[in-house]
Amino acid sequence: MRFSKIAIGVVLSVAAFSAHASNYIDIGFEENEIRISEDDGQNGNFYQTYMGFGFTPLATSPFQIIGSMSSLQADDPSNRDSWDRVRKQLYVAYKWQVGDLTFAPMAGVRHHTYSDGDRRDTEIRFFPNLNYKVSNSTDVYLGGYVSTIPTQNKDRSGATEDYKSYTDYKHELELGVKYKLSLNQYVKVGVFSEVDAFEDKAPDAYEGLNQLMLRLAYGGNITDSLFLEGIARFDIQRDKKFVGLDTRDEKRNRYGVNFSYTLDQDWKVHGMAYYQTEDNKAHDGNGNVIGADDTNDKIVYSLMIRRSF
């Protein structure tokens, strides 16, 4: 389960592609309402508060420093050891324009500490942020990130109580096309890939994910102040891998809306809401798939206020 798509994922990608000459502070929150029928330890509400900033040291340079801190808390006390955590992020970004090609890379770290005290990890992330203008109406883009994740965990094999160091890998990348229908409206079609790979996992343990997804979006400015974007995401493949056990193809579908509203030249409100379904395949005590799918439901909404300087 992943949280904070608006506060951290969307805001960072927008910051990398938008004008770098502004400084800003963000404050926001997110709520996740999750129902997983076979695992009560993940049912319930999860809340996240967020603060972030963007800073441009030189007004004449596209170089920018971006950071954030967020805190995730479970409403149910029985879930808190598993899910409560603090996230800190710090990135640097730059932007080059070469003809019709825009290269706006961003790189930095994302660090997590967890309330159970048994885990901490630091992701080293690189966002390529490439955009090629094919014509006045069509762009091809590559978004997302790749990361290595140096991690400190209790011995994953369970053989000892010692802390050990691991290096995991993750990427989330989207290759797509954006087509302008008019001056104010567009459609986007993208293919998204996510891969998680965990080092040195014990028998029967979760070892990684291989996901391929179709992403669709339609958006535009409704007024001079209001922007709306509708999204739909459909998994083509989402294989969850377990050491020595069956691979589970547990697909997700998501339907939602993003918006932003400009109050004045200094203040802007961003928001997001979506509904997600996820397959939950019945399995035996050894993790082997034995029956038909159940469905997990998730509702997420976020609101963030940005003050520019």
Image: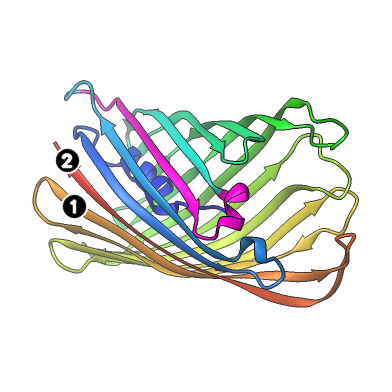
Is residue 133 something one can see in this rendering?
no
Q: CA distance from mark 2 to mark 1?
A: 8 Å
Element under label 1? strand
Q: Is disc 2 in contact with disc 1, using a CB cutoff of under 8 Å? A: yes
Q: In the image, is residue 107 above or below residue 274?
A: above
Farthest-out residue, top: 58
Q: Residue at x 37, y 36 (%)?
A: 68
Give coordinates of residue 282: x percent, y percent: 80, 72
Farthest-out residue, left: 264
Comes first in the chain, label 2 or label 1:
1
Residue denoted by label 2 = 308
Give coordinates of residue 56: x percent, y percent: 23, 27
Q: Residue at x 36, y 37 (%)?
A: 102
Mark 1 crowdedness (10 Å alpha carbons): few <14, some 14-19, many ≥20:
some
Q: Quadrant of the N terminus?
A: bottom right
Residue 67 within the magenta-colored segment of the rendering? yes
At label 1, the amino acid type is Lys
Residue 268: mark in rendering: 1
Q: Residue at x 81, y 39 (%)?
A: 201
| Bounds of the magenta segment | 61-83
